[in-house]
Amino acid sequence: MKRVSMLIIFILFSVKAFAGVALTGDMAYIDRNFSGVYSTFLSKSDGITMVAVKDNNFYTYMPKKDILIKWQVDSIDYKETLINLIGKDDSIITMKNLLGDIKVSMDDGGFILNRIRGFTKRDADAFLDVVARSNGSAAAIDKREKTTGVGNLKASFDCKKASTKTEIMICSDPGLAQKDIEMSVVFKQAVAASGDNGAGIKKGQKAWMKERNKCGDTQCLLQSYQEQIDELVSLRTYMSKPAEFR
């Protein structure tokens, strides 16, 4: 994917801006060491990103794509002032405090967030609205479908709940959505045909999904899907044969 210079703002809000559950010790530590407003240079498609600690949860939000992600805090290294975060698709990012700035590391690279300032009340109010809408607001779902097209297509999962970059791409492209459905069908058939060996196929599917999620464009995803579908069809055919003919 072509890289272009563009100012990206990462906003990490202090819990003081929110009414809600008091932070636990670990989350208070994260809030204290990672809250603020940051900038960096990333791809144009990423747009502005907000990151926030609220009610003992850690969020990232991309307003341009209306994508809100809640991360699980996997571990904290107090000595290195570092946190490891896991997404619902098992994606992992690491944030390390560098005397104010933050180093972000991912499977496919990383970047530095340069601290600009603390949060503002306007930022906090906007983010609170995003979180409220994500919790089931019908108006929010309608707005998202009209502005992004996400939710109008059918895939193997509920496109109205798509949140990751990969899920958004799948739910925005009819060809990808169809491939995702086809994948789901042959995967289930391969697992059923494998009997006691189904666990191995499930493990392989999770590994494939991690690789799939590294794709940055539709063509890459289409190729990844087709290759995995072909692999699963071969497994299904092989495992469907009587044991003596395998």
Image: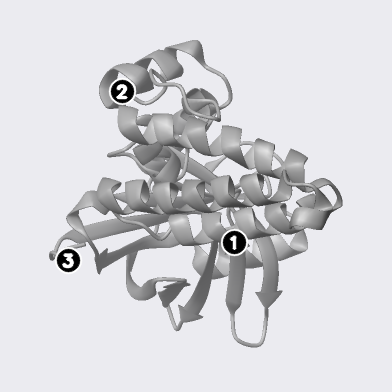
Residue 44 disc label: none
| Residue 220 at x, y percent in the picture | 31, 54
Residue 149 disc label: 2
Disc 1/disc 3 C-alpha distance (Å)? 27 Å
Using the image, determine if residue 112 lies above or below residue 152.
below
Q: Residue at 83% across / 46% down in the picture?
A: 195
Q: Residue at 31% across / 38% down in the picture?
A: 65
What residue sits right under mark 1 in the picture?
207
Looking at the image, can residue 29 be seen? yes
| Residue 175 at x, y percent in the picture | 32, 32
Front in this rendered view, residue 227 or 245: 245
Q: Residue at 51% across / 44% down in the picture?
A: 69
**Quadrant housing the N terminus:** bottom left
N-term mark: 3 or 2: 3
N-term mark: 1 or 3: 3
Front in this rendered view, residue 182 or 155: 182
| Residue 67 at x, y percent in the picture | 41, 39
SS assignment at label 2 = loop
**Amino acid under label 1?**
Ala
**Amino acid under label 3?**
Arg
Q: Position of 186 compared to 60: left or right?
A: right
Q: Position of 74 compared to 208: left or right?
A: right
| Residue 21 at x, y percent in the picture | 71, 41
Looking at the rendered image, the disc whose residue lies closer to the viewer, 1 or 3, is 1
SS assignment at label 3 = loop
**Quadrant housing the C terminus:** bottom right
Looking at the image, can residue 66 be seen? no
Q: Residues within 10 Å of mark 2 (few under 14, many from 20)?
A: some
SS assignment at label 1 = helix
N-term mark: 2 or 1: 2
What residue sits right under mark 3 in the picture?
3
